[in-house]
Amino acid sequence: MPRRLWMVGLSSLLATACSSSPGTQPPLAPCRATSGGQVSLGIGAYTVIDPTQTAGCAVFPANPAGTTIEYLVVPQSASSIPDDSQAFKLGGNPLAAPRPPVPLASTFGPNVVQQFDLRLRLSEPQFAAQVPRPLLAPPRAPALVTPVDSGHVRTFKVCNTLNCDPRKPTTLSTVTATALKVGTHIAIFVDNAAPQPGLTDSDLNNLRTVFDTRLYETDTLAFGGESDIDNNGMVIVLMTGKVNALVTSAQCNSPTGGYVAGFFFGADLITTPPFATGNAGEIFYSIVPDPSGTLSCPHSVSAVTQLVPVTFVHEFQHMISFNQHFLVRGNFPEDLWLNEGLSHYAEENGGRTFLPDTATFCRYAFGDLYNSAQYFAAPQNYFLVDTAGIGGLANRGAYWLFVRYLVDQVGAALGSADSVTRRLDGTELIGAANVSNATGGTAFPTVLARWALANYVSDLPGFTAPPELQYVTWKFRTDYQTMKTACAPFFSTGNLPSQFPLTPSVVDGSAALAGMLRAGSGSYYRLQQAASAPGFTLLFSNSAGGALRTTLVPRLNVIRLQ
């Protein structure tokens, strides 16, 4: 299918697939003791029930013991269709009417900065769909490299608005900058018009060192190589006030505002007009110090030197991913949710190289922990698989947690954590197919079900989770408080929880539950069966009592806790 038609077809598919109307289909028959979906589990065992194959039924046996049996029950959508959702009911008949979706707090929705990031990432596959398939990138030839020399002056086209689009020349400004520090892999250019006094020679030396000798190596080991279409052997770090000025001072200080610390734009690596910026090179853009706030809200020298490296390691993954998927293999850029998850993992991964320097590690990992806590607090309210892929903080928490889980689970089998992320970036596959391939062919719904269960049982006290249901690197029930204490001298940690925020509702076998299934995520319930209680059934249906859509890939994940 031609690329232009593919994009139109995708839009139509999403519009159709995401419709959650239950329609006029007949209601499912009540579950009986002999219905499909039989649940027979010992402590620590789990099962995944596909309600489309069991007429919606899950059948639990009687409890002959003198103690309570407890199950974790997670109705989930394993759909790979972004933004796919449908209302559900779970329990006996009649059931309570489904509760309306819980409004999301505006502070956790995408702010203007995240919306800018979204526009950049969305534009990349759109542009890729309309430019000629690139030739396979040739191997880099060091002998032909034209190096960047310190003192070299050149001009760049830089986004001057949050609605940046190279097809609209007015959204790009010309910036003249000078290469002030050049390393083996990184050349730092500073806008000649940057506010003064700015970064000192010592500040620039420190930035060059952390970019060149630590973060560049960390990201390329984890994700693969970047392109070199400008044949200079360098990734350019362009520090310019145009980035500061992308938001006004009022936007910067608004609860839904914030500021852009830095970005990568795939249009720099496209050479086909009108989809190219004209820079034709590997560039990471960053803010410059502006203590007086002449361009937007103030940014001190220390704030810039601490924040920009964290942003670089995140955005450099996007640059590598764009190269590996599009330039090297001629395919579409990675799905946005997985692309963003890999970049958030890059932050944590970069931060770990500084340990035992806790202060620096906090700068890199604190945001990911905070975001994950927002997701754990209400996972049923957020998509993992979504169109934006650069959603609010809770969505970002889900992306990071999922990639973190993949690395923990697959890394040992492949020999290293880096081998997992290199496999995810170094492929023509994207999204669900990429995840399945990276996990050795495990079906995407299976990976999602295991991840959903791991989110609660991984380090549950007094319970030994199966190995495939565990995070290895983090013990969230204790690590939130550990990081809250460790990061307190350096950050305001008041919003990082002391307790694990995922607290499922406790119900019994006669529960009448309802909610919304969102692609990739699930709702969590602790289902308790009293001593000597008879067996019971659960009917998993849409809001009208009919069958859930097969395209939603509904799953009822059940693990016995006691």
Image (tube, rainbow, N blue to C red):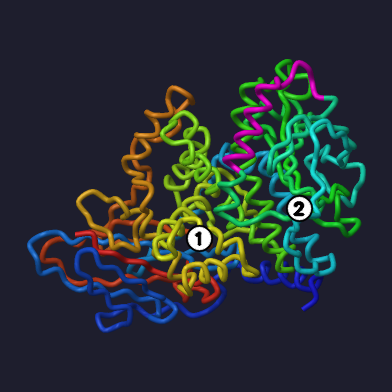
Asked whether 219 or 432 is in front, the reply is 219
Q: Residue tagged by mark 1?
A: 419
Q: Which residues are magenta?
A: 194-215
Q: Residue at x 75, y 41 (%)?
A: 236
Question: Residue 355: where, in percent of width, then height?
Answer: 43, 36
Q: Residue at x 39, y 31 (%)?
A: 484
Residue 375 magenta-highlighted: no
Q: Is residue 334 above or below residue 362?
A: below
Q: Is residue 543 above or below residue 313?
A: below
Q: Is residue 167 above or below residue 95?
A: above
Q: Indicate the amino acid at tag 1.
A: Ser
Q: Residue at x 62, y 67 (%)?
A: 427
Q: Left or right of 486: which side holds 200? A: right
Q: Residue tagged by mark 2?
A: 266
Question: Residue 303: where, in percent of width, then height?
Answer: 62, 24
Q: Where, by quadrant of the figure, is residue 424 drawn?
A: bottom right
Q: Secondary structure at mark 2?
A: helix
Residue 200 magenta-highlighted: yes
Q: Is residue 52 above or below residue 472?
A: below
Quadrant of the rendering where the N terminus is positioned: bottom right
